[in-house]
């Protein structure tokens, strides 16, 4: 069975991530958020006391375009991720997230300041668990 993955995050997938979705998760269609909804997802107002209503258009879009068993790659603002993961479980969707390996290098420069660089590399996707 082939299935779709819906992307609720603010990055582009790497070739390695696409390959994993196709081969390990049997994905045959990758669906990015429409621009309007991407703007909603990427700019959640920190001053809102609750965000469920703010996310309503995203829930409606997912409900109208997905089938049970489809994946939702969800990463972002913590409360929004929590809301979407709960929505996925109720709707029979499979919420996943990316895991990364982080490498940090520090270099002391000639003027005594410290320059820090971080390198992130994809390791695997992992399903959210109840």
Image: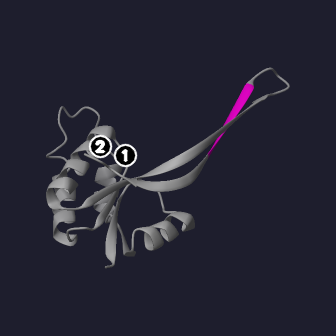
Could you say where residue 116 lies in the image, as x and y percent from the top left?
A: 68, 33
Judging by the rendered image, the residue that carries numbered circle 2 is 44
Q: Is 88 covered by the magenta stretch? A: no
On screen, 91 above or below 28? Answer: above
Real-space Cα separation, disc 1 to disc 2, in angstroms? 9 Å
- Describe residue 37's horizontal placement relative to residue 125 as left or right: left
Could you say where residue 97 lies in the image, as x and y percent from the top left?
A: 39, 52
The residue at the point 18 percent across, 57 percent down is 59
The residue at the point 25 percent across, 31 percent down is 47
Secondary structure that dominates the magenta span: strand
- Describe residue 39's horizontal placement relative to residue 21 as left or right: left
The residue at the point 14 percent across, 55 percent down is 90
Judging by the rendered image, the residue that carries numbered circle 1 is 76
Could you say where residue 14 lies in the image, as x and y percent from the top left?
A: 54, 63
- Describe residue 45's horizontal placement relative to residue 121 as left or right: left
Given contact means CB atoms under 8 Å apart, are the residues at marks 1 and 2 in contact?
yes
Q: Secondary structure at mark 1?
A: loop
Q: Which tag, 1 or 2, sits closer to the chain's start?
A: 2
**Which quadrant of the figure has residue 1?**
bottom left
- How many C-alpha atoms fall within 10 Å of the one at disc 2: few (<14), some, or many (≥20)? some
Residue 13, disc: none
Q: Where, quadrant-wise, is the C terminus in this rendering? A: top left
On screen, 20 above or below 58? Answer: below
Could you say where residue 15 lies in the image, as x and y percent from the top left?
A: 55, 68
Q: Is 118 covered by the magenta stretch? A: yes
On screen, 49 above or below 26? Answer: above
Provide the residue span drawn in magenta: 114-119
């Amino acid at each position: 069975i082939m299935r779709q993955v819906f992307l609720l995050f603010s990055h582009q997938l790497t070739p390695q991530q696409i390959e994993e979705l196709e081969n390990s998760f049997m994905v045959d269609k990758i669906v990015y958020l429409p621009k309007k909804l991407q703007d909603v997802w990427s700019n959640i107002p920190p001053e809102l006391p609750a965000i469920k209503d703010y996310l309503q258009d995203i829930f409606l879009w997912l409900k109208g375009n997905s089938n049970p068993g489809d994946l939702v790659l969800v990463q972002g603002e913590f409360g929004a991720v929590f809301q979407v993961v709960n929505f996925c479980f109720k709707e029979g969707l499979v919420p996943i997230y990316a895991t990364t390996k982080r490498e940090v290098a520090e270099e002391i420069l000639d003027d005594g300041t410290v320059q820090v660089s971080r390198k992130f590399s994809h390791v695997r996707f992992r399903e959210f668990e109840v």
